[in-house]
Image (cartoon, rainbow, N blue to C red):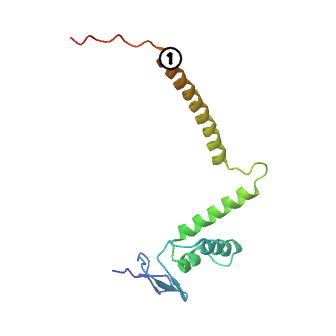
Amino acid sequence: MRKRIRKSDGAPSTAGTERSGVEAVDGARRGRPGRRTTDERSRAVLELLAGKATVDQLALRFGVQAGTIERWRELALESIGAGLRQGTSRSAYELDLEKQLGTLKAAFTDLAIRHELVQKALKTRPSRPGRSPR
């Protein structure tokens, strides 16, 4: 069941309807919403940043929600920022992961040393006296 909502200009709209399968939007065949290649995502973000199209126009053309186009833009801008970052090329997340790795390596080394000491102590420990077969 499709809901028809009248726009302010009196034209019917299909807001609230779901698209599935293959559709033709602006003459281009599009697959299921959300399944876009990297090239398509890049083209959409470049058009958006260049001011050639709005978020809503791109969402309609690519068969995704407007929020998806905005997420693509945010990811692209983060990547650009990471590429232009001065000094270290690592993000804050990567630096945090390196710090955690160092902590884990130190803990592992400590445990390996303790394990080796316990193994040596067990080898030199005298065995229990045997029980009589009676």
Viewer-proximal residue, 111 or 130?
130
- Residue 134 position within the rendered picture, expressed as x and y whole percent measured from the top left: 20, 11
Q: Residue at x 59, y 30 (%)?
A: 109
Viewer-proximal residue, 123 or 40?
123
Q: What residue is disc 1 on?
A: 121
In the shown orientation, is residue 60 left or right of residue 76?
left
Q: Residue at x 54, y 21 (%)?
A: 117
Q: Residue at x 65, y 47 (%)?
A: 94
Viewer-proximal residue, 114 or 116?
116
Neighbor class of circle 1 (other Cα within 10 Å; few <14, some 14-19, many 20+) is: few
- Residue 73 position within the rendered picture, expressed as x and y whole percent measured from the top left: 63, 66
Q: Is 71 situated above or below 59?
A: above
Dot 1 amino acid type = Ala
Residue at the outermost front position: 133
Viewer-proximal residue, 69 or 109?
109
Q: Is 109 situated above or below 29?
A: above
